[in-house]
Amino acid sequence: MSKTSYHALHLHFVFSTNRRKRCIKGNVQIYLYEALRALISDSGGQVLSVGGTTDHVHILASMPPTVDLSKIIQKVKSTSTRWLNERYFTDDKFRWAKGYAVFSVSQSMIGKTIRYIDEQWDIHKSSSFKEELIRMLRAHNMELDTWDGPVRRKKRGVGVSSEI
């Protein structure tokens, strides 16, 4: 019997700015996306796509099976917050909202998920982040109880959130 292990863990992370403040713009967005790629890479992951709009971020990444997702997201959010505040937000401090959502993505859906992330600006011409999040949660058999409250699972699934 082989001692080799195989894994293909593709995860779609979503999190927003505190109170959905629309502050991820221009150079901030460019710098932030580069920083998020570097932070995920430093944690052993490989970013396949990163995008979003002025108030939230989507990251599609391949992750090793040994990672603690909550610790990685905590590191990504705290480090990017510090970097953004040092570089761009000296007066009005930048903050991420508490919590996040994460969804598993099958190999066959990677291309579609990358396109979805790339098309965020078009998607949000006709729907809000809240509407988008509710659709994503429902697709994974979860529901949002309150906008600033926790997500309740209907059944088993991948996803964690609080004040997304």
Image: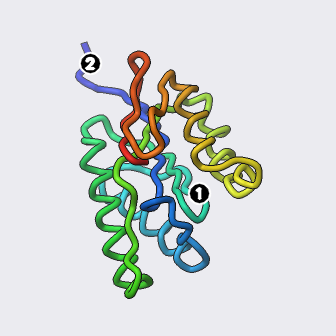
Q: Quadrant of the N terminus?
A: top left
Amino acid of disc 2: Ser
Residue ID at (55%, 40%): 133
Q: Which is more foreground, mark 1 or mark 2?
A: 1
Q: CA distance from mark 1 to mark 2?
A: 42 Å
- The answer to which image quadrant residue 112 occupies is top right
Q: Residues within 10 Å of mark 1 (few under 14, many from 20)?
A: many
**Residue behind mark 2:** 2
Q: Secondary structure at mark 2?
A: loop
Residue reaching furthest front? 146
Residue ID at (59%, 49%): 129
Is 5 on the left or on the right of 129, as rendered? left
Q: Is 145 rendered above or below residue 27?
A: above
Residue ID at (53%, 72%): 23
Query: Residue 68 bears which disc, if any?
Result: none
Q: Are marks 1 and 2 in contact (CB under 8 Å)?
A: no
Image x and y of residue 15, in percent = 45, 51
Q: Secondary structure at mark 1?
A: strand
Image x and y of residue 148, in percent = 42, 46
Which of 110 and 82 lies nearest the eye of the viewer?
A: 82
**Residue behind mark 1:** 52
Amino acid of disc 1: Gly
Tag 2 or tag 1, which sits nearer the N-term?
Answer: 2
Q: Is 87 rendered above or below residue 94?
A: below
Q: Residues within 10 Å of mark 2 (few under 14, many from 20)?
A: few
Residue ID at (54%, 61%): 55
- The answer to which image quadrant residue 92 occupies is bottom left
